Amino acid sequence: MSLGSAVHQKPGQPGRNAGGRGEARPEAMRDEARPARHETEGSGRDDLLAQALARENMVLAWKRVKANRGSAGVDGLSIAETAAYLKTHWPRLREALLDGSYRPQAVRRVQIPKPGGGVRELGIPTVTDRLIQQALLQVLQPKIDPTFSEHSYGFRPYRRAHDAVLMAQRYVQDGYRMVVDVDLEKFFDRVNHDILMDRLSRRVSDRAVLRLIRRYLVAGIMDGGVVTQRYEGTPQGGPLSPLLANVLLDEVDRELEKRGHRFVRYADDCNVYVRSRRAGERVLDGLRRLHLKVNEAKTAVAQATGRKFLGYELWRSAGDRIKCAVARKALETFKQRIREMTRRSGGRSLPEVAERLRTYMPGWKTYFQLAQTPKVFRELDEWLRHRLRALQLKHWRRGTTMYRELLALGASKTDAQRIAANSRRWWHNSRLALNRVMPIAYFDRLGVPRLS
């Protein structure tokens, strides 16, 4: 029996024929919470838990969890192993979910290094719990999302980071040249469960769903084989976490709207645009009075141009037009990643390096497509080709090999002799005559992506 058959079953039926992306994709239309046509199986239109566990919704949820890949939780079961487990255990789990006896397993603590230092803490649920959370998300988000502020962009259907950046650009172009850049300190780790559940209960009346979400909030965290209880926070890593964060932060949005501010919020990154520093300080004081724990080191009232937001920064052109650029920190992160892929000590051939670049650069280019800095992208392309030429010289290593291979590529004897005579100066030699021997078209044939 397939996993699809398992999630199709009703409790106690042994062999009837069931089938995610969890967190959000940066495309124009995120489908992680696209509603399926729910079958409530006679439970009534308002029974959200029955809708979540309906056959078609579960099939869609499994597809997204599987497509999102991800590692195992505390039970050690991969996606494939979970599929095998659910073939026989899903009817029992479904019945436990419906009668309220289901208890989620603890999440596995994972720490991900941040590019600028420090770590981001994730809590990875088991694949089974990711499946259940995804199924809940697909019925809850269509119901809850319309209640959110239009200024909120993070982890919402039909919205993406690009929309937030373009709105910020519009505010600054309209003359709101100061930004209150608010960073909420460890927001996901400090969510008050009682407050969150109170806000959620205003939007969801199904007590079974509320009870299950509360159990996900208080599920323990396993670190080093030891499970500790959790009394606050909603760890990032589960499909429901972004929606729950938006529920809690909607109060901030409404307060800013009530005061008539121009602002953009993406998850826990919030930028408020004002005309003067004094106005910005008043806004910041008001946010502190909402009992938000603000990271003072990262929060500032500053010029909007040059300030990083979602990997971008704004700059002012000669005609006083506000334009987008890749933030300096994001550029350095990109270059560091390229350095790792093109290390001369990696032992990879040029075609192998080109293949690795193709897995990274197109996605990076798509995300930063709003950048209005063609010169920067041209210079990055030149720098990358410089590194690849140096890599090829290192692989040839000896002057005699360089001379032979350069002639085979069509180099003149003079150029081949000049480069081979300085065989250990790979970086220096990767300019000069080698540009003629290995031009842009050479790298195009290898399939090396271009940014410009």
Image (spheres, rainbow, N blue to C red):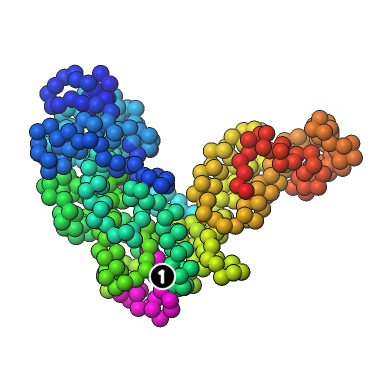
Question: From where the camera sits, is residue 186 visible?
Answer: no
Residue at image point 84% right, 36% down: 411
Left or right of 35, for residue 334: right
Residue at image point 60% right, 47% down: 451
Q: Relative to 43, is 80 above or below?
A: above
Dividing the image into 4 quarters, which one contains the N terminus? top left
Give the percent coordinates (x, y) of residue 30.
36, 44
Give the percent coordinates (x, y) of residue 41.
12, 32
Q: Secondary structure at mark 1?
A: strand
Residue at image point 19% right, 47% down: 213
For disc 1, the marked residue is 273
Left or right of 133, for residue 208: left
Q: Which residues are magenta?
A: 270-287
User: Foreground residue, 397 or 365?
Assistant: 365
Left or right of 37, for residue 177: right
Q: How many numbered markers are drawn? A: 1
